[in-house]
Image (cartoon, rainbow, N blue to C red):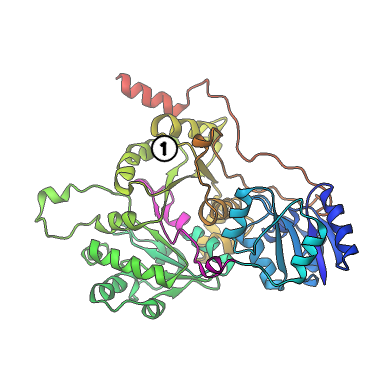
């Protein structure tokens, strides 16, 4: 049996020598992060080729599991090569991450080499329930306030990243005001789409086979799209009862269902119309009520943050205890000056009580190229900072969400940074890492805070 040992520190040598004494052929040693760097295309040239060749040659890889070293992308890469993953974990959080990625029962990082050798020659040990359990959360609703903060872009890129691990992912356009996914991706919007799924759900004839027939495949990404309304005037077709039933059927159809919804959350039309009549915002409210996770998108500029804070209270009142992951999209220093991340983070924390923020940088060149090609940004520019940011968000906040927010743990907010290119870094040498969260001084008010204070005083 040929094995790769991907463990940091002196433990790598100890494990390798012990495995060789047990008759295991250790063909390579590398840092634990080398697999993730190769899988996420942060390692280029001959170095990446060396890692990929070793993975293809090996029968198994013994890897130290952490959020920096393990993700669905790494699992998919090893699955394609037919290489088994034997996880080593330090604590309970790493064990939950290994379970979320579908790995076998992990061993302790300080386990004796003979125990690791026994695990290599034995059949993978899995809990029966874990082997058949489907990933959670299942329905992810992407919402954002008015002003085009990037809801559809985040929803599309999130669906593509979730499909990388071989999962079946559905992308639903439930926007009753300005549906745009079909137009952006070059899909025919004259087909049945989500409206037809809602009609079939009301009649009780919607199942996985019917959803597969109605949906349109998004290239080779593994994402099936239920397109939105081709005319906004058809919004009465997406009633609350229909949308709720259709999304319930999607739970049995796809591992993850990403739903793009409209911005308005108002219920004022109930005052002016018949109580039994249709509601234009019913599709948005119904999707938010059945969601397992809500991705709330805010524009990373003073206007976008102000709009998000005004609508955030209504969102929390609608979703109740459903987890909400806040994504600041389109981050750029030009709109906020120095320390753009810190200003957005402190403003959301001070006025909205948002303790954890994920940042997606602005990348107009890649976005324009994707729009021109009518394809997702992840396909047109796989190494785009925007793509890498959404990929990390999908792996850490969706596939393996943290149990508690940083505020509850007494820590700082997590942020997304585009991964640094590692073309000049040797993958087989030890690599130091730092925290991805930025630490900034909170002494000076931000421009958004000053504008809010001025309005309050005025």
Q: Which residue is mark 1?
A: 305
Q: In the shown orientation, is residue 387 left or right of residue 455?
A: right
Q: Is residue 164 above or below residue 296?
A: below
Q: In the shown orientation, is residue 90 left or right of residue 216?
A: right
- Expressed as whole percent of the image width and height from the top left, the position of residue 435 reads 65, 39
Q: Is residue 201 above or below residue 429?
A: below
Q: In the shown orientation, is residue 145 left or right of residue 334?
A: left
Badge count: 1
- Expressed as whole percent of the image width and height from the top left, the position of residue 198 reads 28, 70
Residue for point 23% across, 64% down: 241
Which part of the image, by quadrant, shows the N terminus?
Answer: bottom right
- Expressed as whole percent of the image width and height from the top left, the position of residue 228 reads 34, 66
Boundaries of the magenta span: 127-155
179 or 354: which is nearer to us?
354
Q: Is residue 5 above or below residue 146?
A: below
- Tell me the quarter of the picture where residue 44 sits: bottom right
Q: Is residue 359 above or below residue 280?
A: above
Residue for point 34% across, 72% down: 193
Q: How crowded is the residue under tag 1: few (<14 C-alpha within 10 Å), some, or many (20+)? A: many
Q: In the shown orientation, is residue 286 left or right of residue 34?
A: left
Q: Is residue 179 magenta?
A: no
Residue for point 12% across, 48% down: 271
416 or 368: which is nearer to us?
416
- Tell me the quarter of the picture where residue 181 sits: bottom left
- Expressed as whole percent of the image width and height from the top left, the position of residue 227 reads 37, 68
165 or 229: which is nearer to us?
165
308 or 10: which is nearer to us?
10
At mark 1, the secondary structure is helix
Q: Is residue 132 magenta?
A: yes
Which part of the image, by quadrant, shows the C terminus?
Answer: top left
């Amino acid at each position: 049996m040929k094995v790769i040992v991907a463990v940091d520190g002196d433990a790598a040598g100890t494990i390798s020598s012990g495995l060789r004494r047990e008759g295991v052929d250790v063909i390579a040693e590398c840092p634990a992060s080398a697999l993730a760097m190769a899988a996420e295309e942060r390692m280029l040239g001959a170095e990446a080729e060396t890692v990929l060749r070793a993975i293809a040659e090996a029968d198994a890889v013994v890897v130290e599991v952490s959020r920096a070293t393990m993700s669905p992308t790494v699992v998919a890469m090893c699955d394609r090569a037919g290489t088994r993953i034997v996880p080593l974990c330090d604590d309970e959080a790493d064990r939950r991450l290994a379970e979320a990625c579908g790995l076998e029962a992990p061993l302790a990082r300080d386990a004796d080499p003979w125990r690791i050798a026994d695990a290599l020659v034995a059949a993978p040990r899995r809990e029966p329930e874990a082997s058949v359990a489907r990933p959670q959360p299942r329905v992810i609703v992407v919402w954002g306030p008015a002003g085009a903060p990037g809801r559809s872009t985040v929803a599309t890129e999130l669906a593509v990243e979730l499909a990388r691990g071989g999962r079946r992912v559905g992308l639903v356009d439930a926007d009753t005001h300005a549906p745009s996914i079909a137009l952006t991706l070059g899909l025919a919007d004259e087909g049945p789409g989500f409206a037809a799924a809602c009609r079939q759900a009301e009649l009780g004839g919607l199942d996985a086979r019917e959803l597969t027939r109605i949906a349109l495949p998004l290239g080779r990404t593994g994402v099936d799209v239920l397109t939105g309304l081709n005319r906004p005037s058809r919004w009465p077709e997406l009633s609350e009862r229909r949308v709720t039933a259709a999304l319930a059927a999607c739970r049995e159809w796809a591992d993850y269902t990403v739903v793009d919804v409209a911005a308005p959350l108002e219920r004022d039309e109930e005052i002016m119309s018949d109580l039994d009549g249709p509601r234009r915002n019913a599709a948005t409210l119904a999707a938010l009520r059945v969601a397992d996770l809500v991705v709330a998108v805010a524009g990373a500029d003073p206007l976008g943050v102000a709009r998000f804070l005004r609508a955030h209270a209504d969102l929390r009142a609608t979703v109740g205890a459903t987890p909400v992951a806040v994504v600041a999209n389109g981050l750029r220093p030009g709109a906020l000056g120095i320390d753009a991340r810190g200003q957005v983070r402190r403003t959301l924390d001070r006025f909205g009580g948002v303790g954890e923020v994920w940042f997606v940088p602005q990348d107009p060149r890649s976005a324009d190229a994707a729009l021109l090609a009518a394809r997702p940004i992840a396909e047109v520019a796989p190494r785009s900072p925007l793509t890498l940011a959404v990929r990390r968000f999908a792996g850490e906040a969706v596939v393996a969400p943290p149990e508690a927010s940083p505020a509850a743990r007494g820590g700082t907010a997590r942020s997304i940074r585009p991964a640094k290119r590692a073309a000049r870094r040797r993958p087989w040498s030890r690599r130091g890492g730092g925290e991805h969260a930025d630490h900034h001084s909170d002494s000076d008010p931000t421009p958004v805070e000053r504008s809010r204070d001025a309005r309050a005083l005025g």
